[in-house]
Amino acid sequence: MTGLRLGPLLRYVDGESAGTATIWVETDRPCTAEVRCEGGAHGSSRTFLIAGHHYALIPVTGLTPGTTVAYEVLLDEVRVWPPEDSPFPPSVIRTPAAATPDTAAPGTGTPELHVSFGSCRWASAPVGEPDPVGPDALHTLAAALAADPGAVRPDVLILLGDQVYADETSKATRRRLAGRRDLAEPPGAEVADFEEYTYLYDESWSDPQVRWLLSTVPSCMIFDDHDVIDDWNTSASWLAEMRTKPWWRERILSGLMSYWVYQHLGNLSPAELAADKLYAAVRAESDGTPRLREFAVEADADPACVRWSYRRDFGRTRLLMVDSRAARVLAEGHREILDPDEARWVRDQALTDPGDRDHLLIGTSLPWLLPPLVHDAESWNAALAGGERGPRWARFGEKLRRAADLEHWAAFPTSFEKLADLIAEVGSGPDAPATVCVLSGDVHHAYVAEPLWRTDQPRSRVVQLTCSPVHNSIPLSIRLGFRFGWSRVGRRLGRAFARHGRVAARSVTWGKTGGPWFGNQLMTLTLRGRAARLSLAQVREGEGESGAAARLATVDERELAP
């Protein structure tokens, strides 16, 4: 009998009530995967083959707007989900109410939208084993929702990078790696190929609580560096050096291939999937591996030939998920976070239909607004590495850039300013949204920062909302370093760096209005009409083995737009 190897993951649910959704599965052999819902909605798809693994993305149609329906997954007509002995409530698809003249306009009749987000998640420890970094925020959220079916659940879960760690594997994964190759040879205990990437997703998504959560809460994802390797695409020098390593080519191709299969496909709508030539080609082949590998080769050689960024609309809220890793231009003197085509696409999507948006969410794995000392240090370093103070300082700047991970938006000053200009333009028109929220992670703490433009301030409330980690370590050095980065002394030191690097004055200044908060955590935006409320929940360990009684405690709540 065909088995369900991983999933189901509820990925896309139409945010404007067209009655469609997609569900991702991995099976243990070729089959027809089917979803059947209460009320008659359904969908089916034949699996496709990549590197010996079988996958399907099942489009579900016929959903009724404004309803919540339980669903089952069948493989070759045999039900495999939910399991017969499942301790969890049924997995459901919840669709938003259809837009009407009353609910489409801002006002009290508009339904609430709950958007939860975070980044940086090591897989949960196996049952019965102590967790060295404390309870997992996703695991804890799942347990809370399963225990109280009436609890408010996210309408979408946004995972902002480092869904898996290709360069920091667990003991269990290292044992699997050692079973197929000598870990004394590079890349050692890091993953080397597509098969080993599947181990990471097995470990991350097979935890029972997290598996159920992802089956019933829609998710949007984007990669960050650890999905491939720490500091991925830091600089042209970094990339040139990596390409000399004999194991790198297989690593980057496998990283792109596995991301496309496990994360990227589920970000797309059924209409986008139907128009995707690569998806069609892979499904048309008896084995889609060669075609997908060819795509990865092209994407590695010319990042501008593929767009990983995407847009999702949830009624009058727009999410722009921006690829801040693979789309980089790395040549010194021309460094950009986004290549020109990607930047134009982001701009077009941000400015399209302004009167139809109450809120604009810009998802980028890397924070736009960092602690001021960190920002100025990265801008200074970029100037040094670019030759502003001569060749000796340039060599020092490149060494420091890699050693200290100085490769956020601040390390690409032109891109930083372009994003500032775009946000100001979006937020200044007569149809400006109530809020423009930049959602980010990466830096292993959470905070709220608000910019002030040196010229006209936008009408929209603009906030940087950073939330990390979902489940990872927070060393003391990070706590002390980022606290100092926000301090007055840190600001003065940052300005000294900027003067030494002859860094141009920024168009914006900013201050921290919340945080820093350290711990495993999730932020949630609650949006209703033009009102916006933010809450931060951290995991609190309770009594019992393996954090079984852990809970999510609200540690901050604030109105962003009344």
Image (tube, helix red, strand yellow):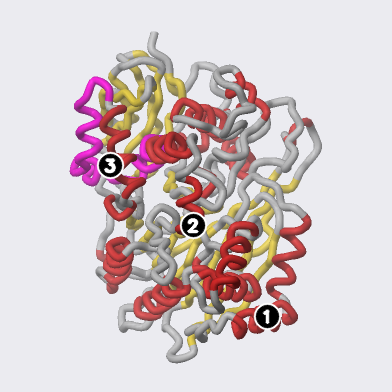
Task: Work out whether mark 1 precedes mark 2 in sequence or the reverse, and give the earlier one.
Answer: 2
What residue did someone put label 1 on? 491
Residue placed furthest toward the right = 543
Q: Secondary structure at mark 2?
A: helix
Q: Amino acid at mark 2?
A: Ser
Depth check: 57 or 401 in front? Answer: 401
Q: At which x and y percent is residue 266? A: 36, 41
Select label 2 or label 3 by which is in front: 2
User: In the image, which disc is placed on residue 420?
Assistant: none
- The structure residue drawn at horizontal position 74% and vertical position 48%, both measured from the top left corner, is 540
Q: Amino acid at mark 1?
A: Arg
What residue did someone put label 2 on? 237
Q: At which x and y percent is residue 163? A: 52, 43
Q: Amino acid at mark 3?
A: Thr
Select label 1 or label 3 by which is in front: 1
Depth check: 13 or 249 in front? Answer: 249
Query: Dot 1, how many residues are within 10 Å of its Cα: few (below 14), some (14-19), or many (20+)?
Result: some
C-alpha span from label 2 to label 3: 45 Å
| Contact? badges 2 and 3 (CB < 8 Å) | no
Depth check: 144 or 438 in front? Answer: 438
Query: Dot 3, how many residues are within 10 Å of its Cα: few (below 14), some (14-19), or many (20+)?
Result: many
Quarter assignment of residue 60: top left
Task: Work out whether mark 1 precedes mark 3 in sequence or the reverse, and give the earlier one.
Answer: 3
Select label 1 or label 2 by which is in front: 2
- Would you say residue 490 sits in the magenta stretch? no
Is 454 situated above or below 329?
A: below
What secondary structure do most residues of the magenta stretch adopt? helix
- The structure residue drawn at horizontal position 22% and vertical position 42%, both measured from the top left corner, is 276
Q: At which x and y percent is residue 132? A: 75, 39
What residue did someone put label 3 on? 20
Quarter assignment of residue 50: top left
Quick check: can you spot residue 68? no
